[in-house]
Amino acid sequence: MSGAEPAEAPEERSFLSAAEAAALERELLEDYRFGRQQLVELCGHASAVAVAKVFPLPALSRRQRTVLVVCGPEHNGAVGLVCARHLRVFEYEPTIFYPTRSLDLLHRDLTTQCEKMDIPFLSYLPTEVQLINDAYGLVVDAVLGPGVEPAAAGGPCTRALATLKLLSIPLVSLDIPSGWDAETGDGDADDGLRPDVLVSLAAPKRCAGRFSGRHHFVAGRFVPEDVRRKFALRLPGYAGTDCVAAL
């Protein structure tokens, strides 16, 4: 009598649903005992590394080294604050626009770190798009993450997104382009953005399948191999000591 047939291995894929991405994060926090601040730090550092790969400092003029980092009040905003701090360490010249500040202690600590490193914070975002185009070499979109609607982030964030859509300088979005539906990508023609660079955090979300910009990176080297296998992730290998990989 033959034994039971072995269960089929899950089909490998490059993108996760919003529910799967949340389950992966829970696995890291609860089973592997990563700390929330630890994950934000890893993602923010890797995001800054991705920026440096696409826009290497030696190739930039003084003006092009200026980076505007636009942060929202949720998880992506915290990653943006860390990204700005590391860009400063890498000798870029970041400025932060953080219109709806979170009262969360982690956000407050990260804000203090940026302030102590003399990273300027804008009190308002100019509505005249050309002023931003002239002042900065690129913009980092850390406004909305998966599952965060523009209205939930507050009016200032919604107005900032409307301005960012009109910019002609390069745009780098963290995790998902703000305003996109994490599953379908719907909204990119309306409230969302069309970034030149996308940095997927931990693993790409389904909407990344619709990304058509120049560079797509995954910042997930910290995800243990067992977790990658559990979620059947088929992603490129990381070269050397790199913390990001091009997709």
Image (cartoon, rainbow, N blue to C red):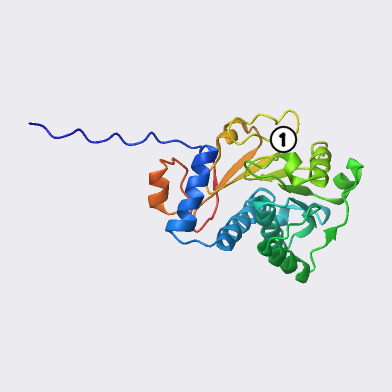
Q: Between residue 148 and residue 238, name the one nearer to us.
A: 148
Position in image of residue 20 (x %, y %): 49, 41
Q: Between residue 110 and residue 236, name the one nearer to us.
A: 110
Relative side of 230 to 111, left or right: left
Q: Residue at x 64, y 34 (%)?
A: 181
Q: Between residue 148 and residue 205, name the one nearer to us.
A: 148
Position in image of residue 58 (x %, y %): 71, 57
Q: Quadrant of the N terminus?
A: top left
Q: Between residue 209 and residue 1, name the one nearer to us.
A: 1
Q: Residue lying furthest bottom in this view?
A: 116
Position in image of residue 12 (x %, y %): 41, 36
Relative side of 75 to 153, left or right: left
Q: Label 1 neighbourhood size at 10 Å, few (<14), some (14-19), many (20+)?
A: many
Quarter-of-image position of residue 182:
top right
Residue 39 visible: yes
Quarter-of-image position of residue 196:
top right
Quarter-of-image position of residue 176:
top right
Relative side of 104 to 234, left or right: right
Q: Quadrant of the C terminus?
A: top right
Residue that label 1 marks: 194
Amino acid at pointer 1: Arg
Element at label 1 = loop
Q: Residue at x 83, y 36 (%)?
A: 166
